[in-house]
Image (cartoon, rainbow, N blue to C red):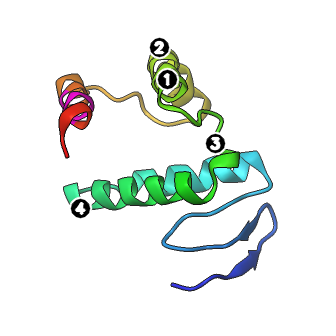
């Protein structure tokens, strides 16, 4: 997909590529992010999400609050501590059966995997 500029009522997206968007309006940015994440239903969807996240980090590092691994992991920790509030604030159901060990497996494997 090429570069496109799109304007809608609540947001302005520029450089739309591979499903990654930049928004001016934070609430619309969150809404669009949730739509993308909610669409993840398979391993391949998750891998595509990771590829897009890597590309976004490469192309838009200035927009990332947590640019380095230390701050990124600290933000993950803090978000997990407060995640119930996120689901309440975004009017989503609280996850019930979270496979915490899988997250730990993924993070530890990423430490050593080539």
Q: Earlier in the sequence, mark 1 or mark 3?
A: 3
| Vertical placement of residue 63 versus 12, above or below | above
Residue depicted at x 73% and y 77%: 6
| Whole-number angstrom distance, CA of label 1 to CA of label 2 | 17 Å
Q: Quadrant of residue 99?
A: top left
| Viewer-side label of 1, 3 | 1
x and y percent of residue 16 in the render? 62, 73
x and y percent of residue 33 in the render? 55, 52
- Residue in the foreground of this view, choosing between 61 and 40: 61
Residue depicted at x 48% and y 72%: 18
Q: Earlier in the sequence, mark 1 or mark 2?
A: 1
- Residue in the foreground of this view, choosing between 68 and 50: 68
| Whole-number angstrom distance, CA of label 1 to CA of label 4 | 27 Å
| Vertical placement of residue 97 versus 12, above or below | above
| Whole-number angstrom distance, CA of label 4 to CA of label 2 | 28 Å
Give me the disc on residue 37.
none
Q: Residues within 10 Å of mark 4 (few under 14, many from 20)?
A: few
Q: Relative to 11, is 31 on the left or the right?
A: left
Secondary structure of the residue carrying numbered label 1: helix
Tag 2 residue: 81
| Viewer-side label of 3, 4 | 3
Tag 3 residue: 64
Secondary structure of the residue carrying numbered label 2: helix
Residue depicted at x 72% and y 71%: 14
Q: Earlier in the sequence, mark 3 or mark 4?
A: 4
Q: Relative to 43, is 76 on the left or the right?
A: right
Secondary structure of the residue carrying numbered label 3: loop
| Viewer-side label of 3, 2 | 3
| Viewer-side label of 1, 4 | 1
Tag 1 residue: 70
| Vertical placement of residue 49 versus 94, above or below | below
Q: Residues within 10 Å of mark 1 (few under 14, many from 20)?
A: few
């Amino acid at each position: 997909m090429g570069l496109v500029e799109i304007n809608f009522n609540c947001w302005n997206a520029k450089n739309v590529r591979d499903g990654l968007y930049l928004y001016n309006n934070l609430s619309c940015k969150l809404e669009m992010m949730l739509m993308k994440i909610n669409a993840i239903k398979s391993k391949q969807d998750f891998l595509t999400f990771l590829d897009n996240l890597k590309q976004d980090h490469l192309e838009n590092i200035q927009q990332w609050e947590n640019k380095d691994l230390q701050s990124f992991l600290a933000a993950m920790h803090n978000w997990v501590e407060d995640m119930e509030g996120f689901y309440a604030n975004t009017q989503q159901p609280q996850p019930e059966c979270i496979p915490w060990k899988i997250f730990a497996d993924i993070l530890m494997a990423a430490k050593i995997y080539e």
